[in-house]
């Protein structure tokens, strides 16, 4: 019995040691369980923040798609009806006036982007996750030297942090700024349209080409004018005879015909312009809303000659001693109000137009105010009053005007956007142009 | 003396047994916890990976467009999920989209998040859920 005691004692000590070891492990394992639970919570929190960041990036893309689509559709304006417009197409050019171009369209895009992005962040918020306010956005462009398609990085900035508050386990603060790269030619489209329709005026070039293609007689393409003359005997040419003068210019086809020819030439020239502007990346759909053409006799000079015949009726009005002098004509004019008096001075070789100025004319009476021959002496004055021999020479100006809407379409890709329904749509920059070969609204006849 | 020793031995044996059971229980709990953590992490990682993949467009964008009723191909998602889920037992649901592979594979571990949809005044986000089995 005594021999068992040491063995029992050793066994007890060994058992105590084993129990102590187990107890110690038990305590450690309990801590491990708690730490494991904590780690699960931390990893879950990190993943939640990562999910939020992925969704914010995609929200930035959708916000850009939608705001870019809306701004392009309104020609750079959110509400194109708030500016001078043609059925909702803002006038980027109104003759020489190009103030309708939305030079701050990037700011408008930014404002609309932030508005839409805020709606997304409001919907992405979940329990414990705080998404801060976003205050600004930038769209730096990466211009590729090889690819015509640009890359735009949408950078959305916030003064706050993404915060996932999973206390007491963990609280995560992460950078809230969002960056998302998007392939788009949105900005390039505005650049192109500005270049072709604002900085230069492609429509005007097409209109000039339309006039030039008619090929009027005596036509100067640089000044857009022709010169023609009309002789009428004994009176002023009537308005109808001015048309006849135009007939002289365009080989007998007349004013109306000249206008018709110009108008007929405008659409093909604008179609040619549309064709030349369109490329594989951007398509220009130029829709002609209204055209006008006009031919105007801008300056006319009347000269007297004897080309109508040599029937000069002279009347000796007697010597002039003092000027001004009122001369009484013994015969009344044949056509009151339209008859011309020319005052001649008698020279050795015949009669010559002396340059007297007739200031006023009342039937049978006119007043001479000056004479190159002085006021003294025996000067014979003759009045020629029937017929008057007139040649009217006029300069004609040609006007071609067009009012067009331009829809510049991005053919490289379609964005998923909302416009009544959600669908894939091309971004289209819409605007209007009113132009004329010369920026003279009065004669271009389009407003 | 003999009785004392017998008593001590009895207490020690019972105590040992209790500690052993408690220890095994805790060990089992730890293993199970780690397994749960691993699978939960795996489900979240699967969803995170899926949403980070780009196939011409990011998958998160393709999913959003498909949920919105737009005509985009999503058949490749099945292949992608089969590659990133070792057990090949999964399901994905997002709005009207449902992808599933091998039902009744075992316990489910679920991960979900909200993803944005193409802009619409009526709905901007939808919940995407991935279940790993």
Image: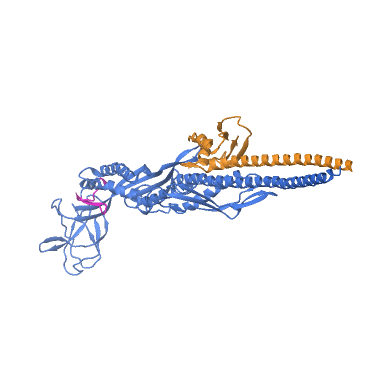
- Tell me if I can see residue A399 in this picture: no
Residue A92, horizontal then vertical, whole percent: 41, 50
Quadrant including the N terminus of chain A = top right
Residue at the image position 15 percent from the left and 61 percent from the top: A352
B71 and A231: which is toward the camera: B71
Answer above or below: position of A376 versus B7.
Answer: below
Rendered colour, chain B: orange
**Does the image show residue A155?**
yes
Measuring from the top left, give residue A55's x and y in whole percent.
Answer: 56, 44
Q: Residue drawn 52% across and 48% down? A: A113
Residue A7, located in which quarter of the rendered image?
top right
Q: Nearer the viewer, residue B28 or A144?
A: B28
Residue A57, position as x, y percentages in the image: 53, 47
Rendering colour mode: by chain
Left or right, A359 with respect to A289, comes to left
Residue A94 magenta-highlighted: no
Task: Say which of B78 and A258 sits in front.
Answer: B78
Q: Nearer the viewer, residue A360 or A427?
A: A427
Residue A260 image-quadrant placement: top left
Q: Which residues are magenta?
A: A218-240
Q: How many marks?
A: 0
Could you say where residue A414 lies in the image, as x and y percent from the top left? 44, 41
Q: Colour of chain A?
A: blue
């Amino acid at each position: 019995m005594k021999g068992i005691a040491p063995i029992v004692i050793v066994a007890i000590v060994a058992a105590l040691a084993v129990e102590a070891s187990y107890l110690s492990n038990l305590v450690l394992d309990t801590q491990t369980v708690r730490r494991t639970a904590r780690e699960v919570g931390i990893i879950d929190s990190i993943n939640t923040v990562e999910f939020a960041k992925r969704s914010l990036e995609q929200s930035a893309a959708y916000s850009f798609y939608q705001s870019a689509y809306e701004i392009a559709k309104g020609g750079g304006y959110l509400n194109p009806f708030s500016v001078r417009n043609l059925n909702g197409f803002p006038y980027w050019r109104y003759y020489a006036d190009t103030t309708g171009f939305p030079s701050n369209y990037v700011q408008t895009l930014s404002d609309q982007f932030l508005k839409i992005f805020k709606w997304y962040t409001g919907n992405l918020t979940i329990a414990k996750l705080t998404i801060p306010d976003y205050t600004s956005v930038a769209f730096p462009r990466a211009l590729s030297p090889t690819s015509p398609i640009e890359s735009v990085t949408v950078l959305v900035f916030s003064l706050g942090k993404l915060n996932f508050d999973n206390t007491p386990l963990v609280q995560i603060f992460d950078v809230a700024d969002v960056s998302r790269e998007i392939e788009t030619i949105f900005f390039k489209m505005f650049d192109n349209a500005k270049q072709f329709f604002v900085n230069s005026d492609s429509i005007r070039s097409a209109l000039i080409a339309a006039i030039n293609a008619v090929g009027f007689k005596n036509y100067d393409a640089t000044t857009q004018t022709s010169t023609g003359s009309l002789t009428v005997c004994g009176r002023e040419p009537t308005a109808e005879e001015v048309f006849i003068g135009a007939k002289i210019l365009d080989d007998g086809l007349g004013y109306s015909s000249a206008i018709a020819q110009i108008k007929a030439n405008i659409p093909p020239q604008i179609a040619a312009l549309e064709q030349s502007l369109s490329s594989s990346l951007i398509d220009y759909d130029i829709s002609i809303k209204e055209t006008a053409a006009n031919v105007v006799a801008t300056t006319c000079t009347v000269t007297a000659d004897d080309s109508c015949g040599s029937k000069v009726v002279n009347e000796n009005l007697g010597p002039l001693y003092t000027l001004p002098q009122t001369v009484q004509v013994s015969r009344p004019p044949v056509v009151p109000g339209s008859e011309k008096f020319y005052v001649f001075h008698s020279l050795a070789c015949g009669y010559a137009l002396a340059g007297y100025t007739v200031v006023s004319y009342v039937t049978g009476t006119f007043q001479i105010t000056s004479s190159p021959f002085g006021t003294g002496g025996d000067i014979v004055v003759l009045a020629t009053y029937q017929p008057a021999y007139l040649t009217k020479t006029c300069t004609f100006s040609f006007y071609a005007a067009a009012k067009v809407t331009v829809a510049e379409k991005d053919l490289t890709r379609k964005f998923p956007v909302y416009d009544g329904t959600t669908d894939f749509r091309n971004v289209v920059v819409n605007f209007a142009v009113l132009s004329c070969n010369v920026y003279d609204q009065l004669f271009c006849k389009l407003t | 003396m003999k009785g004392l020793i017998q008593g001590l031995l009895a207490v020690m044996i019972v105590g040992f047994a209790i500690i052993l059971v408690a220890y095994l229980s805790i060990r089992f709990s730890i293993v199970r916890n780690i397994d749960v953590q691993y699978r939960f992490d795996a489900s979240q990682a699967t969803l995170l990976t899926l949403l980070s993949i780009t196939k011409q467009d990011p998958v998160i964008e393709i999913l959003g467009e498909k949920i919105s009723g737009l005509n985009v191909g999503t058949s490749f998602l099945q292949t992608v999920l089969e590659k990133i889920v070792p057990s090949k037992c999964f399901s994905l649901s997002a709005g009207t989209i449902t992808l599933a592979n091998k039902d009744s594979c075992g316990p489910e571990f679920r991960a979900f998040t909200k993803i944005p949809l193409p802009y619409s005044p009526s709905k901007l986000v939808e919940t995407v859920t991935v279940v790993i089995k």
